[in-house]
């Protein structure tokens, strides 16, 4: 089975920290492949995902080719995590789904400020 690909901002320590957390909680070591938005691999494998778009939000490319962006990727990510799989069901509740959009946008739009405030600048990249 082909891995699900997570495309993230490798210049953001919050994003790198989240990718490390996802990696450490994945069901299998090959569940996700992590690709930096800034990488040549992203440009060559996923030319349809523009750099501006992937710098705006996380992109999840499913093995079947579907692309889920931002908050839409969260339930699918949770579904593949040890101990957190059950949380994916909550995203089927309309209020949670709507709330997740606003919370995700708020965090994504302020991720560099959050990174500087909460995380050390030396956070290891995935």
Image (spheres, grey):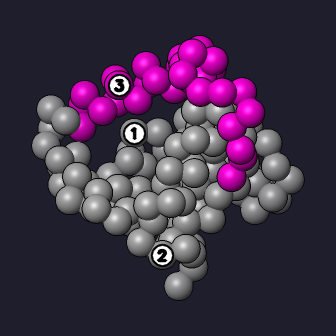
Q: Above or below — where is 15 with respect to 110?
A: below
In percent of width and height, residue 55 lies at 66, 33
Residue at mark 1: 71
Task: Identify the magenta region.
Answer: 97-126
- Position of residue 100 in the picture relative to residue 30 (left or right): left
Report how many numbered discs are placed on residues in the image: 3
Instruction: Please say if the residues under marks 2 and 1 sit with CB atoms less than 8 Å apart.
Output: no
Most frequent secondary structure within the magenta stretch: helix
Secondary structure found at label 2: loop
Residue at mark 3: 103
Label 1 and label 3: CA atoms lie apart by: 9 Å
Residue at x 50%, y 50% (from the top left corner): 21
**Residue 15 is a magenta residue:** no
- Position of residue 26 in the picture relative to residue 10 (left or right): left
On the question of residue 118 being in view, the answer is yes
Furthest-bottom residue in view? 1
Instruction: Please say if the residues under marks 1 and 3 sit with CB atoms less than 8 Å apart.
Output: yes
Nearer the N terminus, badge 1 or badge 3? 1
Depth order, front residue of 66/20: 20
- Position of residue 19 in the picture relative to residue 107 (left or right): right
Mark 2 nearby-residue class (10 Å; few <14, some 14–19, many ≥20): few
Secondary structure found at label 1: helix
- Position of residue 84 in the picture relative to residue 3 (left or right): left
Residue at mark 2: 28
Depth-wise, is mark 2 or mark 3 nearer the camera?
Answer: 2
Residue at x 82%, y 49% (from the top left corner): 39
Label 2 and label 1: CA atoms lie apart by: 23 Å
In percent of width and height, residue 69 lies at 49, 44
The quadrant holding residue 83 is bottom left
Nearer the N terminus, badge 2 or badge 1? 2
Q: Above or below — where is 74 with respect to 82?
A: above
């Amino acid at each position: 089975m082909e891995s699900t690909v997570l495309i993230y901002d490798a210049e953001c320590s919050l994003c790198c920290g989240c990718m490390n957390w996802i990696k450490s909680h994945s069901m299998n070591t090959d569940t996700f492949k992590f690709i930096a938005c800034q990488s040549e691999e992203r440009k060559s494998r996923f030319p349809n995902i523009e750099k501006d778009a992937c710098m705006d939000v996380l992109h999840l490319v499913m093995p079947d080719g579907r692309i889920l962006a931002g908050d839409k990727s969260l339930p699918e990510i949770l579904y593949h995590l040890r101990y957190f799989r059950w949380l994916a069901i909550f995203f089927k509740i309309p209020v949670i789904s709507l709330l997740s959009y606003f919370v995700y946008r708020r965090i994504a739009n302020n991720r560099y400020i959050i990174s500087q405030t909460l995380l050390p600048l030396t956070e290891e990249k995935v």
